[in-house]
């Protein structure tokens, strides 16, 4: 059952650790020896007449451990909150830029400005790669904060944070292990391999090797690209400023995470609590056995009393460093993979099918019989008529649904009646006037002119477009 799996799960457990079980069994064994000495009248067997001293010490130690656990949980939850905040702001900034870029490309294609389209697409490619690098270096920096490095060095020597930072600078820049998106397999997540769209170039690695903060360097690259195309985006600068605000908020979330990854729990508090806990654990067998006088219940109580306080202190130690490599730590690699998924989802070509149904090459599949691209109709009243009555699948957004030469050629396929007036707009001035073909398409009667309105297929439309009438 689920409860059985919960209570018997050993991965990530503090109860089933060897040090915890060994300590509990040791205390229980000492309790059994104390009971044995009392039962056999050993002259040095302990005999305590009042339990006030033990209660006072137990209350102080218990309060200190619970308070430490509360502080540790606050650190852990703050880390989770700020990590979500950081990635949400990174994603917001990228999504906003990508939307601005797609709208700009749409307008550029309508104006046949392919050079601008290529420039915007290059910016999109660079920014997507750099945002993935930003996430990679952010996650790697948090995973290798000062707290984690202290734990790794603890078995060998105790070093100050300043000394560790000097060691890191002497060691030089180390590129995190990366795997390109095309080679990544979700079923085989390889340790700490970060997914990227493009590996850093030789020039980028040279720059990163000379910097002290890779995250800030990559952020500078992103801001530079955004500023470089600020005049090319068809979005007012005040609206574009939102991208920079979200990037700033994302960096704020990163540094809020970094303070938890780098600033350890105060050593004096942890040291004092550890000494008190050891002293209290040594006294447990004496007090428990004296006031239970049982060779069975006494050792059992010794075991669980020790385990309850010792394991609670271990839980606090687990929560204090949430960005480590332990099973109970936050998986920043998982956050990174999810963020890369967002970057890829935003750039899916299928997004254009939803936002721009008339994307090149797909116009005919989307424009079925009776469909109308209202961008070719400049009468606002006529557009509203179609959208309100729904007789035709009027689509009010699209990019170059049909080229102008295709517009006239495929009118019969669309089942649309067109009346070409004497003064066509500039868009259609160079088109041949074929009144018979225009008036009798898709087997519908030719539209007739009515005073004050136009009529097509028996439907009266007021204030039609002065250049054409589509119904």
Image: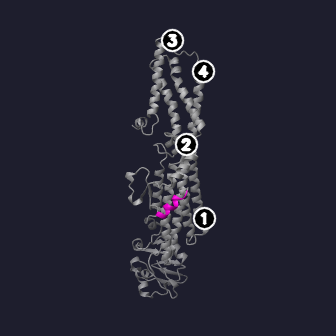
* Mark sitting earlier along the chain (2/4): 4
Q: Nearer the viewer, residue 251 or 81?
A: 251
How many numbered tags mark residues here?
4
In front: label 1 or label 4: 4
Q: Is residue 388 visible?
A: no
Q: Position of residue 61 (x, y in %)?
A: 58, 29
Image height check: is 108 above or below 309?
A: below
Name the residue beneath numbered marker 2.
Answer: 159
Image height check: is 45 above or below 125?
A: above
Determine whether label 3 and label 4 are within 8 Å by CB. Answer: no
Name the residue beneath numbered marker 4.
Answer: 52
Q: Position of residue 38 (x, y in %)?
A: 49, 14
The magenta segment: 201-211
Instruction: Give the main secondary structure, helix, strand or loop, of the magenta stretch.
Output: helix
Determine whether label 1 and label 4 are within 8 Å by CB. Answer: no
Q: Nearer the viewer, residue 325 or 104?
A: 325
In front: label 2 or label 4: 2
Name the residue beneath numbered marker 1.
Answer: 241
Measure the C-alpha gap from mark 1 to mark 3.
83 Å
Name the residue beneath numbered marker 3.
Answer: 43
At mark 1, the secondary structure is helix
């Amino acid at each position: 059952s689920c409860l059985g799996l919960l209570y018997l799960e050993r991965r990530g457990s503090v109860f089933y650790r060897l040090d915890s079980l060994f300590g509990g069994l040791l205390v229980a064994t000492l309790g059994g020896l104390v009971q044995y000495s009392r039962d056999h009248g050993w002259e040095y067997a302990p005999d305590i007449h009042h339990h006030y001293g033990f209660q006072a010490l137990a209350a102080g130690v218990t309060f200190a451990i619970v308070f430490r656990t509360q502080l540790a949980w606050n650190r852990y939850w703050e880390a989770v909150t700020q990590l979500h905040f950081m990635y949400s702001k990174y994603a917001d900034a990228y999504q906003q830029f990508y939307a601005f870029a797609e709208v700009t490309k749409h307008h550029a294609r309508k104006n046949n400005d392919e050079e601008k389209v290529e420039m915007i697409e290059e910016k999109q490619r660079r920014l997507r790669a750099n945002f993935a690098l930003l996430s990679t270096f952010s996650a790697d920096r948090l995973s290798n904060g000062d707290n984690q490095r202290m734990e790794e060095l603890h078995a060998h020597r105790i070093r100050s944070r300043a000394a560790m930072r000097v060691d890191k600078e002497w060691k030089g820049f180390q590129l995190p292990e990366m795997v390109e998106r095309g080679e990544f397999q979700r079923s085989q997540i390889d340790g700490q391999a970060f997914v990227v769209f493009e590996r850093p170039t030789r020039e980028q690695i040279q720059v990163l090797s000379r910097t002290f903060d890779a995250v800030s360097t990559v952020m500078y690259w992103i801001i530079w690209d955004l500023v470089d195309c600020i005049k090319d985006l068809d979005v007012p600068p005040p609206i574009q400023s939102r991208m920079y605000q979200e990037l700033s908020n994302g960096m704020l979330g990163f540094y809020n995470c970094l303070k938890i990854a780098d600033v350890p729990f105060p050593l004096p508090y942890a040291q004092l609590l550890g000494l008190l806990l050891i002293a209290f654990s040594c006294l447990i067998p004496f007090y428990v056995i004296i006031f239970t006088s049982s060779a069975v219940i006494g050792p059992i109580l010794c075991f669980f009393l020790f385990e309850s306080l010792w394991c609670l202190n271990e839980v606090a130690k687990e929560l204090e460093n949430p960005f480590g490599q332990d099973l109970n730590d936050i998986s920043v690699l998982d956050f990174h993979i999810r963020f890369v998924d967002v970057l890829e989802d935003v750039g899916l070509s299928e997004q254009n099918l939803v936002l721009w149904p008339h994307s090149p090459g797909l116009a005919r599949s989307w424009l079925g019989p009776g469909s109308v691209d209202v961008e070719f109709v400049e009468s606002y009243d006529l557009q509203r008529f179609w959208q309100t009555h729904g007789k035709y699948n009027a689509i009010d957004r699209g990019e170059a649904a049909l080229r102008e030469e295709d517009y006239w050629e495929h009118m019969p396929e669309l089942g649309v009646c067109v009346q070409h007036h004497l003064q066509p707009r500039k868009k259609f001035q160079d088109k041949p006037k074929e009144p018979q073909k225009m008036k009798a398409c898709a087997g519908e009667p030719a539209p007739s002119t009515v005073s004050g309105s136009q009529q097509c297929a028996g439907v009266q439309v007021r204030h039609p477009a002065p250049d054409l009438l589509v119904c």
